[in-house]
Image (cartoon, coloured by chain):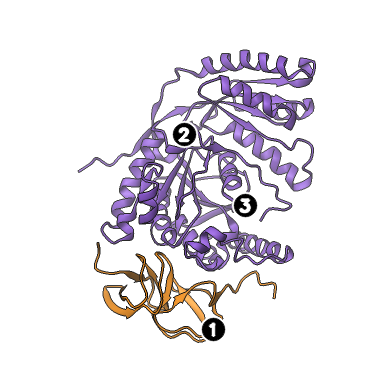
Chain colours: A purple, B orange
Amino acid sequence: MSKVKDSFDGFMRADGTVGVRNHLLVLSITGLTGPTARRISGQLAGSIVVDYVYDSGPVGEDRAAQERGLLGLALNPNVGAVLLISANPPRAEALAEKIAKANKPFEVLILDDCGHDALVLTERGLEIGQRLQSEIDGLAREPTPISELYVAMECGRSDPSSGLVSNPLMGLISDRLVDAGARAIIGESVEWLGAEHLLAKRAVSPNVKQQILDAVSAREQAAIDARIDLTGNNPGPTNIAAGLSTIEEKSLGNIAKSGGRPIQSLVRWAEAPDGSGMHLMDAPAYAPESLTGFAASGTQMILFSTGVGNSFVNSIAPTIKISGNPETCGRLDKQLDFKCSEVFIGEKSLEEASEEMFDVMLDTASGKETWGEIIGEGGEAFARLGASI
Amino acid sequence: MSNWDAIQLDNKDQIATALKNISSGEAIRVKSGEVVSVIDAMEDIPLCHKFAIAKITAGEAINKYGEPIGAASNDIGIGRHVHIHNLKSLRASNK
């Protein structure tokens, strides 16, 4: 009988949050400086790079999301230090002021201060980057209660096994996190369509209930306005080939990830939810955008269920891949971090599998690398709210 | 391998989900709660796909998890594959 774990080993941050990783983040916030940022990060083992490409293009709601997202990624507890690189001095200054409040080591490097020379920027970036890296190296992990965790639940390339096994399994993990005083969240709001009444029933207040219903109506209206048939878009061609027929069917399987506890709040893409419990993020369903929204909201880890297989992971929040489809578990044996096809064929209970899954999650929190981290499959994608649904 | 080939998730559902690839003509053992009954497959049903375990009339709402997942676009006989060719979403309709 294995001992039930009730803590993980994490990195204490000056702002009171706890990281499960200790990365130097090379954060480029303008398209011009992206290649340099990638070059610098490539030379600094252990660093991760985020290459935001739009700069001054986005306006209105997109501009707000951009600023929220960039700050959120810099402040993610898994980030130990930040090297901010920009070709837009005022933007860099505004962001730097906000990062400074978290008291984490960071430096700003401006292309304009390097004579507009990408090679000079590279040289200075390497020098500063290696100094920041050595500053955070050697920080020890400390035992941390589960209540410090904030975990996002995602699904991608779903099939009916997701709704049958892996999503309900994540639902049990969600409930266990919530009961331990931690935070959990699901997003992909177009995939609440047809199941929104079940989420709305769990809202802690009439206000949150209305926000949930309004978020779903807005996504549905966006699809109608774009004159697209959701069948073929979401569920997409891969979902359909695997057996999902309608958005309602997909949604009913999707929301199982959220478990059964009350819904505390609904936040925007990349917005951090307040307080423990289960939360919702009204955000695009496409996995790369969705995961970046979670990471920017502060999640330390992501549980990611898949039907037929989905290799994409977030670069800042370790992403644990789960499948209950027996064919997928056979085909992607080594690429899935947790396989639960025994539940699918009725040879193991959901509860038993969720105990094992919880341990895998805590081991990951304490430093065990996921398949996606080992292979370097991570990336970030910023949501363009004006057009994405 | 278990003692059933497919599962009905809620007693309001007119469909079951295949837990393996099922061939046309095969006797499918369908688990509904604690009861296992047998239905003849009228066509191939791939792993994870749905098939009718009750007669479904065109226009009728089809349930899974005990909740509507769309409506039948034509009559569907027992043992028939239920998918996008005979089940349509009722949401975000442009019609």
Residue A389 vs residue A201, the one in the foreground = A389
Neighbor class of circle 3 (other Cα within 10 Å; few <14, some 14-19, many 20+) is: many
Chain of the residue under the numbered disc 3 shown in the image: A
Chain at numbered mark 2: A
A361 lies left or right of A380: left
What's the residue type where badge 1 is placed? Answer: Asn
Q: Nearer the viewer, residue A204 or A233?
A: A233
Task: Inspect the image, locate mark 3, and give the three-letter code of the amino acid beneath it.
Answer: Ala
| Residue wearing tag 3 | A283
Instruction: Judge whether A128 appears above or below B47 on screen.
Output: above
CA neighbours of label 2 inside 10 A, class few (<14), some (14 to 19), many (20+) = few
**Picture quarter containing residue A107?**
top right
Q: Residue at x 47, y 55 (%)?
A: A258
Q: Which residue is outermost to the left?
A: A1
Q: Look at mark 2 in the image and give the residue it sits on.
A: A375
Secondary structure of residue under mark 3: loop
Looking at the rendered structure, the secondary structure element under dot 2 is helix
Same chain shared by disc 2 and disc 1: no
Give the foreground label among 3 and 2: 2
Q: Chain of mark 1?
A: B
- A336 shown above or below B76: above
Image mark for residue B74: 1
